[in-house]
Image (spheres, helix red, strand yellow):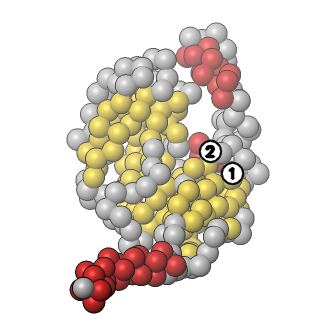
Amino acid sequence: MSSQSSLTRAPGLAALVLLALASTTPHAAAVPVRGLVGLPRDAGTATPPPATRRDHYWNVWAELLDPAPPRVTPEREVAVVLTGEGNPRARGCGYVIEGGDLLPRTLVVQANSRISLENRDGTAHEIYSETLPSLTPLRTAAGRAREIAVPDAGRWELRDRQYPQLEGFLVAVPDLVACASVNVRGEWRFADVPAGTYVLKVYRAGEEAHSAPLTVAANAREVIVDPILLTGN
């Protein structure tokens, strides 16, 4: 009787042992990757703080203020992305209109996909592209979003029929893995990148301004990349 009870308990005991072994087996976790990107010194003056940025643009458009010199910050001017063999849906990528402009001005997207462009302004926008016929000037009301069908890899200029001073770019790449968040100081960060080999790219004005290989080791807790200083206008 005792022998039979031991046999009955054996499968359950084996399962517990396997579970314990699995919990102690090392595994590669996704880790943050961060760094700093700097613009050329002649790239322009600083953008107004977020709290006043929207009012400034509205006053310019209402002709209450003279247009100011170009205001450039990394947050709006650059897009930092990873490319390589990743998930079919790129992570961390968001595309918005805020403060009367695209954020960022270069939208780097996965080729042959659909993206959502959110309008966070207090007025409607009509984004379109003369070089991408399928992107027509569809009215997007304040607080709403529109879907954009992205074709194969390529680069297209973006404009706004309501506000001609808005200029941007749509860049489609075939192997987009993730998009970094970028702040006004140029500090960028990917929240969780799995172990693997990638290419870190920085886009500005619709062009690839920087490219370098990036490896995330299986035992890494965080990856910090050397500062990137862009050149040119």
- Pointer 2 or 1: first along the chain: 2
**Quick check: can you spot residue 204?**
no
Vertical side of 114 occupied by 82: above or below:
below
Q: Tell me the residue at 61%/49% (across/down).
A: 182
Residue 120, x across and y down, in percent: 48, 27
Residue 190, x across and y down, in percent: 56, 58
Return the residue nearer the eye: 189 or 146. Answer: 189
Q: Which image quadrant is residue 126 in?
A: top left
Tag 1: residue type? Gly
Residue 231, x across and y down, in percent: 68, 61
**Quick check: can you spot residue 119?**
yes
Tag 2: residue type? Glu
CB under 8 Å between discs 2 and 1: yes
Q: Which image quadrant is residue 16 in?
A: bottom left
Q: Tell me the residue at 26%/56% (across/down).
A: 112
Q: Tell me the residue at 57%/16% (across/down).
A: 58
Residue 75, which numbered label? Answer: 2
Name the element at disc 1: loop
Residue 186, which numbered label? Answer: 1
